Image: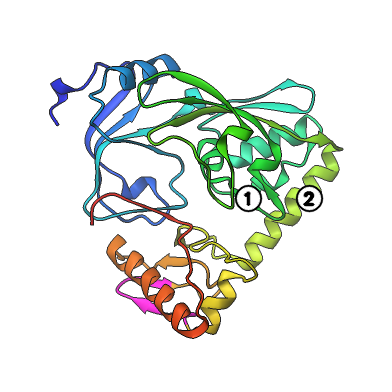
Amino acid sequence: MMADALPKVAGKLTPNAPLAPLVWFKSGGAAEWLFEPKDLADLQRFLRDLDPKVPVMALGLGSNLIVRDGGVPGVVVRLGKAFAKVSKSADLTLDCGGGASGILVSSTARDNGIAGLEFLRSIPGTVGGFVRMNGGAYGGEVKDILIDCDVVLRDGSLVTLPVADLHYTYRHSELPDGAIVVAARFKGRPGVPTDIQAEMDRISASREASQPLRSKTGGSTFKNPPGHKAWQLVDEAGCRGLTLGGAQVSEKHTNFLLNLGEATSTDIEALGEEVRRRVKDKSGVELEWEIQRVGKK
């Protein structure tokens, strides 16, 4: 796709942009084009004028993602500073940009005496990603705190979707394809900042103790099947520490895959599929990927 076939932008448009540095696994190919819009109007204009046949994908902090080695065709949109603001908008409500991190959202909630958003402290992603995936941890889920979100559709139009329209289930929403979450309103309950901080510290310590946070990983690999814990099924199938190429099942938390250094995305995805096969053989349970896999193999 030639540059002259693309709409003019006020932000930054990079051809053949390596995505590995932008994702947690530090593996995978390039985006045909990487677009970092200057502001909301820039994003809307670009999508409106872009050939409707060109695929568009949003990229947040790249935590829950395998970018395949063949790269991602079309345009990858990454929301920068203009979309990373968080402020109190009404009683117990925060107005959050789609590019804001979970840490910023939970800290702003604490500073404003808003409890119930502490769990976002532990999700390594952006508001856009949480809203799309119904992100959750430590007893909280986005569906419990979301009022509504602003979404730019593939044709460039801006719509506000109430939480009911997203039809949330476990780690899944019915957000339209190619839609990009640019803002969301989260509502909590009254709290005392010191208590909120104590809960954030507890979550942080628990995460540090149980998860391989210093490694190149993608977060939780598989969804917990009804009545089971994914890590336990993986462990019982004898997969703790299992390696394939440069990829390994974490010995610290078996629902995490690691890039030991030089793993390709093909290694990581193949290891995940091998784990799924072994779990199916051992327990009869079909594990579902929680990590998104995108691009060409």
Q: Quadrant of residue 77?
A: top left
Name the amino acid type tagged 1.
Answer: Gly
Q: Indicate the position of residue 194 as horizontal and vertical percent values.
A: 84, 42
- Return the x and y of residue 287 as percentages of the image width and height: 48, 68
Residue 279 at x, y percent in the picture: 47, 78
Up-down: is 36 above or below 138?
Answer: above
**Residue for badge 1:** 136
User: Are there few (<14), some (14-19), or many (20+) residues within 10 Å of tag 2?
Assistant: some
Residue, x 44% and y 83% (percent of image)? 281
Nearer to us in this view, 49 or 245: 49
Please give the name of the residue rendered at 16% of the width and 25% of the height, measured from the top-left corner. Answer: 3
Amino acid beneath label 2: Glu
Where 141 sits versus 264, above or below? Answer: above
Q: Is residue 227 left or right of residue 64?
A: right
Precedes in sequence: disc 1 or disc 2: 1
Q: How would you classify the magenta stretch by its main secondary structure? A: loop
- Let me know if residue 170 appears in the view: yes
**Quadrant of the image containing the C terminus:** bottom left
Q: Which of 295 and 206 lies nearest the eye of the viewer?
A: 295
Q: CA distance from mark 1 to mark 2?
A: 15 Å
Element on which disc 1 rests: strand
Q: Which numbered marker is on residue 199?
A: 2
Q: Is residue 268 left or right of residue 250?
A: left
Q: Secondary structure at mark 2?
A: helix
* Residue 241 visible here: no
Residue at 21%, 52% in the rendered image: 70
Q: Nearer the viewer, residue 11 or 147?
A: 147
Judged left or right of residue 267, residue 212 is: right
Q: Which residues are magenta?
A: 239-248
Residue 85 falls within the magenta-colored stretch: no
